[in-house]
Amino acid sequence: MQAVLEKIGKIGIVPVIVIDDAEKAVPLASALAEGGLACAEITFRTASALESLQRIHKASPDFLIGAGTVLSAQQADEAVSAGASFIVSPGLNPTVVQYCVDKGIPVVPGCATPSDMERAMEFGLTTVKFFPAEQAGGLAYLKAVSAPYTSLTFMPTGGIDAKNLADYAKFDKILACGGSWMANKALINAGDFAGVTKSCKDAVAALLGLSMVHIGINTDNGSKSAADFFAKAFGFSARETSASIFASEGIELMNNIGRGTHGHLAIGAYNVERARFHLESRGVVFDEATAKYNPQGKLIFIYLKDEIAGFAVHLTVKV
């Protein structure tokens, strides 16, 4: 159960799919995966949902697929038999949740109030669906209401789109966000799978928030003189650390020859573990020996294995 939730957390977005034609299921899953989202929640709102789920699971067993809008234990059983790895429901139905818990099936019930969340915790759940997210008060409400529940993580769904995804992604209690904008019914019905892939890539980019943070320059004990130059010439204020001097927040002057032939490039991400997962799916290799974790065990820093044009590259938490 936990392994499925961990994978959902690394992917970071769960496309919520309403599909009317099962013939489109497999090419849709391929388009989602090509866009970086090898995951989907097939909602049980249409007659084609169960067959679509079956077809995707048969064609792509590694594709992480769940059943959404599950309203009964029977639906949950049918979905799992068809290949679903997790169950999502709009509300906290005790019968559905208890059935899934007893069977060891990952279940993410909808919760919008503290009472809902506490009931979910009574079932031993660690992740719930915050639904309907925007209509229930959005991120500000979720931050306030989740404060007492330090062991809970959330999968907000409802009103989340390309405009507000990044805001949700920055909150450390968000396991993943659910949404349909990157694979909406119009794109699916039109068979515009290239459009789905592009929307997924754009969504992943917004989710990760990757951007240049600073460049580190190896100076061989010349960091002080270099920092003085930047201060005199450009008026930059210096900030010293144990290993370097930041001539500005974007320029780090190393006291000695550090990692990388010329230095290093620091790339910021909202969530380093999630960024590593997506970069690894693109063929990037990391040096695990350089990984650094915070006291809560969360990855906050790691170097890529190879240099790029003489520079080492590392991921770091984007403030």
Image (cartoon, rainbow, N blue to C red):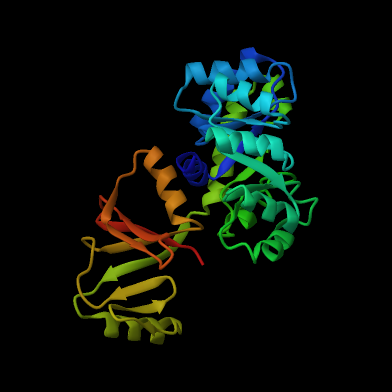
In front of the other: 93 or 70: 93
Report which quarter residue 46 is drawn in.
Answer: top right
- Count of numbered badges drawn on the protein: 0
Mark yes or no: residue 91 visible.
yes
Q: Residue placed farthest to the top in the image?
A: 23
Residue 199 lies left or right of residue 137; in this view the side is: left
* x and y, in percent, of residue 4 in the image: 49, 39
Residue closest to the eye, 183 or 70: 70
- Does 92 sit above or below residue 68? below
Task: Tell me where residue 300 appears, x and y as whole percent.
Answer: 41, 62
Q: Nearer the viewer, residue 240 or 286?
A: 286
Q: Residue at x 62, y 62 (%)?
A: 149
The percent coordinates of residue 96 (x first, y second) are: 68, 34
Would residue 180 be visible to someone looking at this image?
no
Left or right: 122, with 214 as reference point: right
Residue 234 position in % (x across, y down): 44, 81
Tell me which residue sits at (43%, 60%) in the image: 298
Q: In the image, is residue 28 above or below residue 150?
A: above
Residue located at (70% from left, 65% from top):
144
Left or right of residue 257, residue 20 in this image: right
Q: Residue pushed farthest right? A: 135
Q: Toward which corner of the image does residue 113 lie, by quadrant?
A: bottom right
Residue at 68% x, 24% y is 75
Q: Is residue 22 above or below residue 245?
A: above
Quadrant housing residue 23: top right
